[in-house]
Amino acid sequence: MTTASSSSRITAAELPALRRRTSAVLIGSQILGGLGVAVGIALAPVLAAEVSGSEALSGLAPTASVTGTALLSLPLAALMTSRGRRPGLVLAYLTGALGALLVVTASVVGSFPLLLLGMAGFGAGSSANLQARFAAADLAEPERRGRAISHVIWATTIGSVLGPNIAAPASAVFRGTVVPETAGPFAWAFVIFLLTGSLVAVLLRPDPLLTARAFAPEGTETAANRSLRAGVAAVRAAPMARLALVTVAVSHTAMVSVMVMTPVHLGHHGADIQLIGLVISGHIAGMYAFSPLMGRLADRAGRLPVIGLAAGLLCFAALLAGTSGGGHARTAAGLFVLGLGWSAGLVAGSALLTDSVPQAARAAAQGLSDLTMNAAAGVGGALAGVIVSRLGYGWLNAVVACLLLPMAALALRRATGRPATG
């Protein structure tokens, strides 16, 4: 069959090699993309406090990034739906590079609104990294979707763990220049995102989504079936798809809300940039390093048990972090477990969503999923700063634990009713 993105013909016998090639390209892009996101986001709250002059506004920088990720989800999904994964991923990385450049400019001129605009554009890098997990699932066999998604998520570990730890050296490069040290990592992110976009543009051929569509049964692929409206309708029609949407949204909101305020909490208790970087690195390791285990569990034990595991881990993380006080080790442990819970929820929820909607509507439904999760996390991150400034870090974790109850209840209801698809 012939894909819409290439004149080459891909046969069923060639699919295994194409899966490996696609996975290798996505893994490479995730390593670079994860580095670009993590090197900047580690100091985003600190930079926001410096530029705005208000600690209460510090959470708005990462929140703007999450909001930008959400706002870009549907346009990117629309582009991918019509033209494939490659154009959408390239556009997202280039937008992230532009956002990083605006952040550096804002720090030099001291403009907080420009900083927030830049952070919103910077969030496109996260959009690309999130969408790449679905690109990995495009060509995967149904019984291996969890592992395909998790392997691409795992690749982000390398860049994401390295990023916060090189934030300090990346800052030091700009010592004595007009660029504030806390904005230095964003200058590096600008270059990294440009390289990542170039990698995807050159090597992600043929396009995995368009190739998967070429192998779809004749007559199932129409423009109407691939519309965003069809994606919304597909999710509404499938109870398991709705559970998947709730899972990724709640897991991501819980993670973002606690993570964005942890650097501020640590700073209150005497932590320096190096220690903050280590704690965030441990958190990111929890998010990504164990994703292959979560993928294997989701494929073998089922999606619903792993969703239950996610709820339990996230609650335990809130307990650890919320009762840490000035104990840096307990805070670090809580952030690590928080990352594990996020990983379980994202992998199982993403696989369940892909299982539960027709192939023709998957790209649109996946875009809707990313919009929902990032919009919810954007609200959570904005409120997190207010909660911490008025009530404290412990209360933030208590609120997050309460958010997990509806997700756990819905998963239990589905588990005692009909089994998950796939």
Image (cartoon, rainbow, N blue to C red):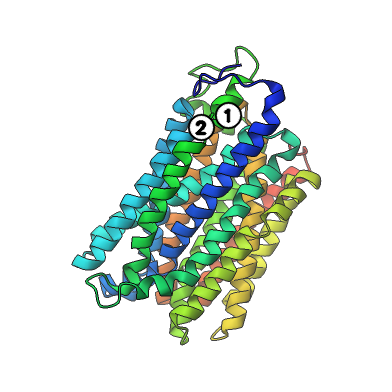
Give how far across and how far down residue 256 sits, in percent.
Answer: 50, 61
Identify the residue position indicated by label 2 in the image: 364
Q: Work out whether residue 190 or residue 356 is closer to the camera in this orientation and state it.
A: 190
- Judge left or right: residue 371 versus residue 311: left
Mark 2, Cα crowd under 10 Å, few <14 / some 14-19 / many 20+, is many
Question: Which quadrant would residue 21 be assigned to in this image?
Answer: top right
Spot occupied by residue 11 in the image (x, y as percentages of width and height): 66, 20
Report, in whole angstroms, how far the alpha carbon at label 1 lies from the one at label 2.
9 Å
> Compared with residue 376, is residue 217 higher up or lower down, i.e. above or below?
above
Residue occupying the point 54% across, 54% down:
31
Q: With 191 as the anchor, is 142 left or right in this view?
A: right
Residue at image location 59% in from the left, 20% down from the top = 214
Q: Nearer the viewer, mark 1 or mark 2?
A: 2
Q: Which corner quadrant holds the C terminus?
A: top right
- Tag of residue 179: none
| Residue 115 point in image, percent of width and height | 28, 61
Q: Residue at point 47% right, 84% down?
A: 271
Q: What residue is pinned by disc 1?
A: 234
Depth check: give the residue in front, 254 or 359. Answer: 359
Mark 1 element type: helix
Q: Amino acid at mark 1?
A: Ala
**Residue flagged by tag 2: what amino acid is it?**
Ala
Residue furthest out toward the top: 219
| Quadrant occupied by the N terminus | top right
Q: Residue at x 77, y 50 (%)?
A: 297
